[in-house]
């Protein structure tokens, strides 16, 4: 379980750093990070929103590490485990997607985002979702 927690935390921290980089004006990789329709991005995230995602991803990293190493002992175990379980459901929902532009069941498959989503983003979301569900079922320790 410790290896799972550290792996998930590492992925979450790396994604948090990537989003912080984008929030600070970096552009590398951003062209494939947003779903498109007709060659145009479906939305344009602002710096504040992108930074908020970075903070959320960092929080998810800490939640993963809380499974083997109780970092938030002031909260009852059930709440901490429930948060990890909720993160698992969130990532599973991301993997399933919106049935149009995002996820395994998307209908629109044109563009760089769709290709990366099928090959990396959705499988990674599935793996993270399952890992968080597993971490959410851990007894207090």
Image: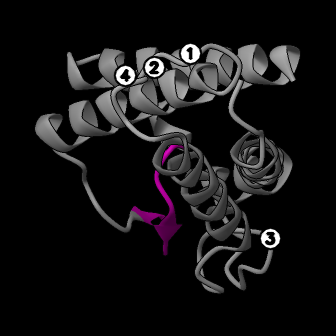
4 or 3: mark nearer the eye:
3
- Main structural element of the magenta stretch: helix, strand or loop? loop
- Residue at the image point whose x is 51% and y is 43% from the top: 33
Q: Please say if the residues under marks 2 and 1 sit with CB atoms less than 8 Å apart.
A: yes
Q: Please say if the residues under marks 2 and 4 sit with CB atoms less than 8 Å apart.
A: no
Pointer 1 residue = 14
Question: How far apart are the two marked residues, 2 and 3, measured between alpha carbons?
Answer: 23 Å
- Residue at the image point whose x is 20% and y is 44% from the top: 49
Q: Earlier in the sequence, mark 1 or mark 3?
A: 1
Q: What range of the chain is rendered magenta?
A: 33-40
Of residue 73 and residue 26, the one placed in the foreground of this image is 73
2 or 4: mark nearer the eye:
2
For the N terminus, the quadrant is top right
Of residue 92 and residue 136, the one placed in the foreground of this image is 136
Pointer 3 residue = 104
Question: How far apart are the two marked residues, 4 and 1, measured between alpha carbons?
Answer: 16 Å
Q: Quadrant of residue 10?
A: top right
Q: Residues within 10 Å of mark 1 (few under 14, many from 20)?
A: some
Pointer 2 residue = 18
Q: Earlier in the sequence, mark 2 or mark 3?
A: 2
Element type where label 1 sits in the image: helix
The circle drawn on residue 52 is: none
Pointer 4 residue = 27
Of residue 65 and residue 139, the one placed in the foreground of this image is 139
The relative height of residue 77 versus residue 17 in the rendered view (above or below) is below
């Amino acid at each position: 379980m410790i290896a799972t927690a550290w792996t998930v935390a590492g992925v979450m921290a790396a994604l948090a750093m990537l989003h912080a980089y984008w929030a600070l004006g970096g552009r590398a990789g951003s062209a494939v990070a947003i779903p498109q329709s007709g060659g145009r991005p479906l939305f344009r995230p602002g710096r504040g929103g992108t930074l908020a995602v970075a903070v959320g991803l960092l929080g998810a990293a800490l939640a993963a590490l809380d499974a083997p190493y109780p970092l938030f002992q002031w909260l009852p175990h059930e709440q901490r485990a429930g948060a990890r379980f909720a993160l698992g459901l969130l990532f599973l929902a991301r993997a399933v997607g919106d049935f149009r532009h995002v996820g395994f069941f998307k209908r629109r498959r044109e563009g760089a985002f769709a290709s990366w989503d099928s090959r990396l983003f959705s499988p990674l979301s599935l793996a993270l979702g399952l890992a968080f569900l597993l971490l959410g079922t851990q007894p207090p320790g």
